[in-house]
Image: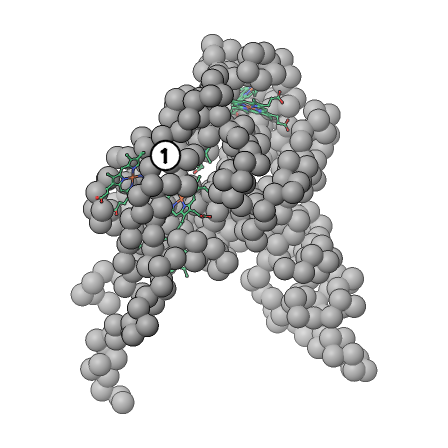
Amino acid sequence: MNKTIRKVAGGAGLLAVSLALPMAAVAQAVPVTSAEVTGSTPTKMNVSNANVFNRLLKKETDPNPDPWEDGYHDPENEATHALQPPKVAYEGWPRTPFGNHVDWVKALNDGLINPRYDRVDPTVEPLVMDLDIVRPVRASVPDVVFPHKPHTEWLHCSNCHPKIFIPQKGANQINMSAILLGKKCGVCHGKVSFPVTTKSCKLCHSKPKPEDWEPPVSEASLKNPWR
Amino acid sequence: MKDVTTRLTAYWKAAALALVASVFWGVSPQPAHAEYGDVIINNYSDAAGMRPAVFPHWYHRIRFRCNVCHADLGFKFKAGGNKITMAKIIDGKFCGACHNGEIAWSVENCGLCHSGKPGTPTHIHGSTVQRLVAPTYKPVQQGTN
């Protein structure tokens, strides 16, 4: 994403500016009218607040603000200013456009961090298991591949088995609704691990369908009396 | 039954959030998004006249893997779900397993943990449920409409 635009759009609150709009329109705090956008002579506009360009879209502001500016740390607490800003810790890490905006898997694999697997002993190695579980999806999106490797590099088997997942291929019913509500994969994804958003779908949905795959057609469509 | 309640709760949460969002983010220049995964814990703090505790999740996972806290130390995967108190902490449980002056700085640094804005409810920051514009979909049972 274009960095400057994100920065300027940050803090603008409800400001209805789409990324495609020219930068000049960004400074004001009222919805932008089409006249201002195209640069033509502004005629009097009476666009009501109900018809702002983005009614529901909230623009991502600075994803890694300093603690004293993040809205829930109290800047009046002096110790807040002694906390480490995330930007300082993430310096030089591979970035992603969601979550903490850093790639934890790559940061670990590239040796940029070396988190302990034991509270006191830094030499204990994790119990890593390389086993992919493919979950065919009835929809057109690529099938889901659950990779044990990046999970067991961080987690113990008992973090997932048997409370969240029965350790048997296909034994668990999973769908997106459950995940979005914080169950199954959503216990972690959408809380502390990369979240579900347009740009992250393919991290889980990573096994493309065969070339000739067609989505099943609904019965209501096959039997449609009005066609 | 439990399913219905959770769905309802989720719906009201989303509705309340949408309301808060339209009032709060609509008029103030504060960021609508901040560090993903920070946990604000306020089961008891406000009531005792302390600022809520803020647990920087990102900061800790740079130093420890998940299993250390969520398997070995027994932290449940639930913001506020561990009923942490100072009595447990000074007995070496939860935060006190490390914040004891040996593995990490010691408990007398109250302000480093109790750094939240008073009145902030317990939650994990920036979660997907929290950020949905509308409640998620309800799956259709096969054979019904």
How far from the left and from the top, in percent, is residue B72? 39, 22
Taking the spot 57% from the left edge, 53% from the top edge, the residue there is A97
Quarter of the view holding residue A85 = top right
Q: Residue furthest bottom?
A: A227
Image height check: is A164 above or below A1?
A: above
- Looking at the picture, how far across and down is residue A6, in whole percent? 68, 57
- Which residue is pictured at 51% across the width and 29% down the height? A115
Residue B108, image x, y percentages: 62, 13
Residue at 51%, 51% in the rendered image: B131
Q: In this view of the protein, which residue sits in the foreground, B63 or A19?
A: B63
Q: Is residue B63 visible?
A: yes
Q: Is residue A9 left or right of residue A139?
A: right
Chain of the residue under the numbered disc 1 shown in the image: A
Badge 1 is on which residue? A128
Apparent side of residue B14 relative to residue B115 in the rendered image (left or right): left
Quarter holding the N terminus of chain A is bottom right
- Count the marks: how many? 1
> In this image, A216 relative to B103: left or right?
left
Residue B103 to residue A212: above or below? above
Given the current orientation, which residue lies at the most extreme top position? B91
**Callout 1, which amino acid?**
Val
Any part of residue B7 in sight: no
Local crowd size for mark 1, using a 10 Å CA cut-off: few (<14), some (14–19), many (≥20): some
**Quadrant into which the C terminus of chain A falls:** bottom left
**What SS does tag 1 mark?**
loop
> Looking at this view, is B13 or B127 the one in front?
B127
Residue extending furthest right?
A: A41
Residue at 47% across, 10% down: B91
Relative to A1, A160 lies left or right: left
